[in-house]
Image (cartoon, rainbow, N blue to C red):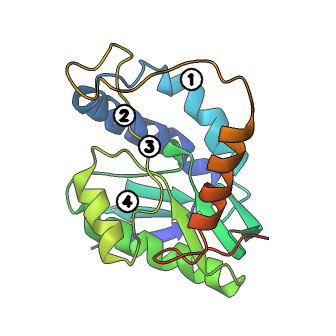
Amino acid sequence: MFETKPFSKDHIDDAVKLFATYYESHRSLQPLLPERDILHQVPAVLSRLTDNPGVAAFREGKLVGYMIETYTADSFMSKRTAFCVDLCAHCAIEEEKELIYQKMYEQLSRIWVGDRYHTHEVSYFSSDKALSFAFYRLGFGMTHFELLRGLEPIDGGNTDVLIRKLESEEPIKALNRLHHAYYPSPPLFWIPH
């Protein structure tokens, strides 16, 4: 079973090692992810987050996962929202990953809801199917996502698309109006300010 504790500076070294392993495994699944010096870059990020609410999960005294709030917003899409969006702000070992995340999220969401943050945003690699399923089971939908692809031209595809410089801003303004009208409508119901 797991034991959870508040995340602290004492957990950073083990968290960085855990994330470095995770990142490299996802680089093999997503070759466009850049090579990073995780062991030197991530400690500074996690150090900046240690004053935020966070959870560390342990099995037999060994760190098996962590999850730290990145920031909060009093009004994101008209809702008080807590974010865990730095990709290195959370990680867990593959074995029993869903259970580890469930336990960490139980702890962190209790803090967020206690502070009246009822909307929670979490970012993760799209190649992490286990994590995607775990968050889906915890009630998350896929309202935002980003994918990586190379910059080479797409073979075949839509050949009737013309890319040119606009002479006027009006088409962009019209697109922006449609864009803003989409969010308050079903299925999102996000009310802009």
Whether residue 143 sits left or right of residue 26 in the image: it is: right
**Which mark is in front, 3 or 2?**
3
Residue for point 37% across, 34% down: 23
The label nearer to you, 4 versus 3, is 3
Residue at label 3?
146
Residue 11 or 165: which is nearer the viewer?
165
The reply to whether dot 4 and dot 2 touch (C-beta < 8 Å) is: no
Residue 35 lies, with reference to residue 186, above or below; the image says: above
Q: Residue at x 47, y 45 (%)?
A: 15
- Mark 4 vs mark 2: which is more N-terminal? 2
Q: Which mark is residue 7?
A: none
Count residues near mark 2 (Cα–Cα under 10 Å), then give few for <14, some for 14-19, many for 20+.
many
Tell me the amino acid under the disc marked 4.
Answer: Gly
Instruction: Report the residue marked by disc 1.
Output: 40
Q: Position of residue 11 (x, y in %)?
A: 54, 50
Which residue is identified by label 4? 61
Please state which of the two labelled residues, at mark 2 or mark 1, is closer to the viewer. 2
Q: Which residue is mark 2?
A: 23
In the image, 107: left or right of 171?
left
**Element on which disc 2 rests:** helix
Residue 148 percent location from the top left of the image: 38, 31
| Separation (CA) of disc 3 from disc 2 | 17 Å
Q: Residue at x 40, y 33 (%)?
A: 20
Q: CA distance from mark 2 to mark 1?
A: 14 Å
Amino acid tagged 1: His
Q: Answer whether labels 3 and 2 touch (C-beta < 8 Å).
A: no
